[in-house]
Image (tube, rainbow, N blue to C red):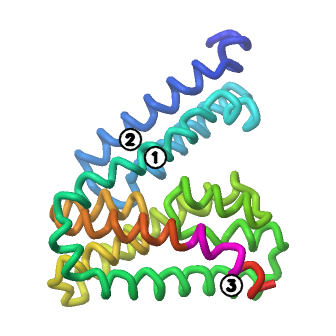
Amino acid sequence: MPSAEILASGVFWSVATIAAYLAARTLYRRLPRWWLSPLLVAPALLLAAALATRVGYESYIRGTHWLMLALGPATVAFALPIYEYRAAIRRYWPVLLIGVVVGSSLAIGSAWGLASLFGLSDALRLSLLPRSMSMPFALIVSGGIGGVPDLTAVFVVATAVIGVAVGEVLLRWLPLRSTVARGSLFGMGAHGAGVAKATEIGGEEGSIAGLVMILSGVANVLAAPLVVLLLG
């Protein structure tokens, strides 16, 4: 077993995180099931490693914080497929805009309503509000409205996994033949994981999903103060 100094170092947990993700992604490519998503398998592997080595969350996040910061620049990469399918986006922008507004409103309203129904604390409720945004946007909004960004990160991952699973079921049962409908379904309901799933279906679906995810994130960042004021 590595020494205590190595286990507490950021290098060890950074390498472990990347290795866990690569292993989880390899498994998912061979067995593409929603419950084998890297968003579930990689954290499970890391949790098992942390429990086995008795390393606390503070040590882990301190060493891997740079990975979280890298999410922002990574989101910009979605601009490339969006540019490639710009003609379709120009054609359908009114529908996409309406979908972003309605989807964001439902996501925020349902999160707040359920949290209030179950009597969750204000910190938990505010942490839940950005659950349907991609991680970089969600963390910004959570910190700005008084939530706990670390909790929000967990809610975002859970929403992504559940969103992909539900999206697969909906595609089997609903006659969604439009690339815009299929892409928007995953981009709004499962953000980053949804974009990856939509890209598996088709290039245009992936681009639409990426656009919806980014538009939703930007819109929610701008509207966050007003939302908190209205819900408060």
Quadrant, the C terminus: bottom right
Q: Name the residue under label 3.
A: 114
Q: Report if the CB atoms under discs 1 and 2 are less than 8 Å apart.
A: yes
Residue type, numbered disc 3? Leu
Q: How crowded is mark 2: few (under 14 residues within 10 Å), some or many (20 or more)?
A: many
Q: In this view, does 51 lie to the left or right of 204?
A: right
In whole angstroms, how far apart are the C-alphas of marks 1 and 2?
A: 6 Å
Q: Report if the CB atoms under discs 3 and 2 are less than 8 Å apart.
A: no
* SS at mark 2 in the image: helix
In whole angstroms, how far apart are the C-alphas of marks 1 and 3?
A: 27 Å
Q: Which of marks 3 and 2 is in front?
A: 3
Q: Which span of residues is magenta-colored?
A: 220-227
| Residue depicted at 22% across the width and 76% down the height | 90
| Residue depicted at 25% across the width and 63% down the height | 206
**Vertical side of 6 occupied by 121: above or below:** below
Which corner quadrant of the image does residue 53 belong to?
A: top right
Which corner quadrant of the image does residue 137 belong to?
A: bottom right
| Residue depicted at 75% across the width and 73% down the height | 125
